[in-house]
Amino acid sequence: NSPFSENSYYSFIQISAWIARIAKKNPKLVSRIHIGNTFENRPMYLLKVGKPSGLKKAIFMDCGIHAREWISPSFCQWFLKETYGKDKNMTDILDNMNFYVLPVFNIDGYIWSWTQNRLWRKNRSTISNSSCVGVDLNRNFNVAWGTIDASKKPCDETYCGSSAESEPETRAVATFIRKQLSSIKAYLTMHSYSQMILFPYGYSYEKTMNHEELNEIAKGAVEAIESLYGKKYRHGTSAATIYPSSGCSDDWTYNQGIKYSFTFELRDKGKHGFLLPESEIKPTCEEIMLAVKFIANYILNLTD
Ligand code: 0X9
Ligand code: ZN
C-alpha cells in the first residue's frame, strides 16, 4: 500500500509524499517526527517505527547524507515498506524495539543531485566569502572535527564547515540523538558505493573497546548479505578498510555512547558507482535488509 517502487529511484517530492502517507496509513506503527529544517528551510522528518509500549530499545538509521548516493534513500524506503507483518522475525523485532528512520538526511543536496548535478555530494549551504556551496555533512560532526580527510576549503568535496555542527541538518540529527541516548542502542548510516560494513574508528587507527564484538557483528552481517546473491562485502574499521576521515556521524554516535555504530557502503564496487542502475535497487535492498535484521536481532538479544 505504499507507492514506493522497487524498480525506480524516487525524487524528493515522491519521497516526502510517501513519508506523509505511510505515517497516515499506519498510525499504530509509524509516526512522523519533525527534527529540524534544512539550510533551504525544508522540514526534516524522521519516521519512528514500532509498536508503542513502555521502555524499548531503539535503532537509529539514516539514509542519504550524501546527495548522489541514491541507492541509500531507496533502502530506507524499502525498509519501511518491508517492515511490519510481512515476516515473523521483523514483526518480533518491531514488537520489541523501535526504529528511527531518517529517509533523506541531506534533502537540499538530494534535490540538487536530481535537478542540477547528478554527482553532487554536499548539502547546499552558502558560505561567506566564497562562491562555492555546500558542506560535507559527514565531516561536520563534532568528533576530531577538521582534522583528517576533511578540508577547510569551501570548494572541496570534503569541506567540513565553519565549525562542528555548523550545518542545520547535522544539528537536527545530533540534537535528536542526544535527547534519545538512553534508548538508542545502535546507529546505522547508509552510503554507497564499495560494498562494505564499517565500524569505528574512522578518525584514528586505534581499536575501540569492543572492537572484537563489532568485528563479529559486521562479519555476521556480511555473511548474511552474501548468502542471498553471493555479493561480497568487506568489513572492518573505517580507518583501515575504506580510509581515515574525521567528523563522521558513526564515530560521533560511538563516542556519545552508542557502542553499535555502523556505516554501510552499498552496491556496487565501481562498475556503475553512484549511478547504480535501477535494476539493482531490489537485490541491493534485499541483501542489505538481511544485514540490518542480523544487527537488530543482535541488539534485541543483548541483556543490558
Ligand atoms: O567518506 C565518507 O564519508 C564515507 N564514504 S563515501 O564514499 N560514501 O563518502 C565513509 C565514512 C566512513 N566512516 C568514518 N570514516 N567514520
Ligand atoms: Zn557517502
Image (cartoon, grey):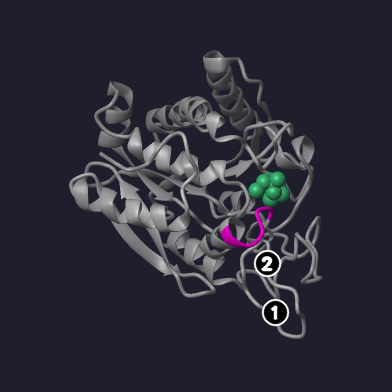
Q: Is mark 2 within 8 Å of ligand 1?
A: no
**Residue 189 is at least partly visible in this image:** no
The residue shown at (71%, 37%) is 237
217 magenta-colored: no
**Residue 140 appears at what percent x and percent y?**
65, 64
Residue count near mark 1 (Cα–Cα under 10 Å), binned few <14, some 14–19, many ≥20: some
The residue shown at (79%, 69%) is 155
* Residue for badge 2: 135
State the residue in front, 83 or 171: 83
The residue shown at (62%, 69%) is 124
Residues at marks 2 and 1 touching, judged by CB atoms closer than 8 Å: yes
* Residue for badge 1: 127
Magenta stretch: give its range: 115-119
The numbered dot on residue 46 is none
Q: Which quadrant holds the N terminus?
A: top left
**Residue 125 appears at what percent x and percent y?**
62, 73
Q: Is residue 200 above or below residue 228?
A: below
Q: Which quadrant holds the C terminus?
A: top left
Query: How far is mark 2 from mark 1, CA to CA?
Result: 9 Å
**Residue 255 is at least partly visible in this image:** yes
Mark 2 or mark 1: whose residue is earlier in sequence: 1
**Label 1 is placed on what type of residue?**
Ile
Q: Is residue 196 above or below residue 17?
A: above
Left or right position of 133 against 182:
right
Left or right position of 129 against 280:
right
**Residue 274 appears at what percent x and percent y?**
66, 43
